[in-house]
Amino acid sequence: MRNELVYFIGQNSSALSALDQLRNDKLVHAILIKGQVGSGKWTLAKAMAKYLLCLSDTEEKPCNQCSSCKQVETLSNPDLIILQKGEPLSSDTKKGASSISVDDVREMIRLISAHAFEGDRKVVIIRHAEDLTIAAQNSLLKVLEEPPSGVFFLLTSSRSDMLLPTIISRCRDVHIDPWHSETILKILKEKGISNDLAEKSAEYAHGSVGRALMIANDEKYWMFRSEVIQDFFTVKDRSEILKISSKWKDRKSEANALFEMIEDCFHRIIMINTLNYAEDSDRMLSADPWLKQFSGKTYENYIKLTDGLILAKEMVYSSVNFQAIIEKLLMSIMEVIN
């Protein structure tokens, strides 16, 4: 099994510094791992927990061979405590709850007060720490101020602005930057994804390993993407608008997925007009030939596109006929093409 910590060595100075402290046994007791959804926060937290709880007496940690490493991998290590919404620690919290309750934090505090089962460490991972209620955060704050010896807290969050400033101030920040497509491609291939599919998924991942893995294993995503591009980004004549809108008129339930896909395509459009290197532009045009018609467009054109999408999103929640919404959106895209 690969040591997943190696992926994060080339991340940035905050990640590198935390890994150096980990190797030199100088890690602070609380780490807040921040980054966009799918950036690898959970992967890093698990890898750090595995390192901290590894029972190997060699310098190569985590060994991935000892009983502790194997138990961390399956989330069954008794010295690893995981707090996340929907998976309560306390019997007073309902399974499937939409937040992490103060009762769960109190139960965690009770668990870490006991002796470690193996070694002299315990690790607490709080996944999506923004899901902690205010009462839960205040309860957590007390233990962060005076942590038991040998206990490490690893918090992950894509919305750290929802955490109390006092929680943030007691943690060391580790920010995960968007990943380079080459790194994502390497990870996908190691996961057994075919070369062509791995390249496509890395291209459309927007720096997110999690997103890349998700779309690489989702055949429906690629079919839907192809359909959206064909219907909304290759239309040349206004006479085609009625045909396309008629096709989509009874698919209002797919509105959110449609708008997300169109927004993703808009992101590609602005990228093709802001890249500084011809080789990057050539790569994007090779993956998406339809982008060529948007090459050289101004920022004002991009504003027109986004305004049209924003209007469509607003109209879909009103009584406006969905076919009319599709037609208006198609018109706004065609205005920029032509």
Image (cartoon, helix red, strand yellow):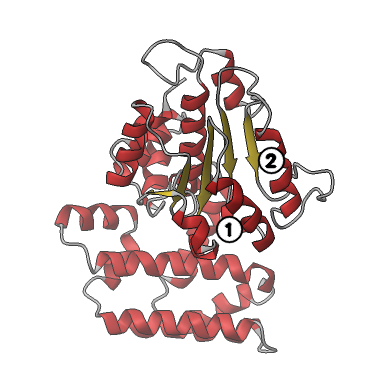
Residue 146 on image: x %, y %: 55, 44
Mark 2 residue crowding within 10 angstroms, few (<14) / some (14–19) / many (20+): some
From the viewer's side, name the closer residue of 166 and 256: 166
What residue sits 37% from the left and 41% below the top?
184
Mark 1 residue crowding within 10 angstroms, few (<14) / some (14–19) / many (20+): many
User: Which of the numbered marks, if any, corresponds to residue 108?
Assistant: 2
Lateral position of residue 135 relative to residue 63, left or right: right
Q: Amino acid at mark 1?
A: Glu
In this rendering, does residue 242 appear at all? no
Residue 126 on image: x %, y %: 59, 45
What residue sits 43% from the left and 84% below the top?
307
Which type of secondary structure does the marked residue at label 2 adopt? Answer: helix
From the viewer's side, name the closer residue of 59 and 71: 59
Whole-Å distance between the Cαs marked 1 and 2?
17 Å
Which type of secondary structure does the marked residue at label 1 adopt? Answer: helix
Name the residue furthest bottom.
319
Residue 120 on image: x %, y %: 55, 21
Q: Above or below — where is 235 with respect to 193? A: below
Instruction: Answer with the quarter of the image where residue 73 lies.
Output: top right
What residue sits 65% from the left and 19% below the top?
117
Lateral position of residue 278 relative to residue 273, left or right: left
Task: Give the mark nearest the N terminus, 1 or 2.
Answer: 2
Q: Amino acid at mark 2?
A: Met
Q: Above or below — where is 181 with respect to 52? A: below
Q: Above or below — where is 184 with respect to 239? A: above
Lateral position of residue 253 relative to residue 129, left or right: right
Disc 1: which residue: 130
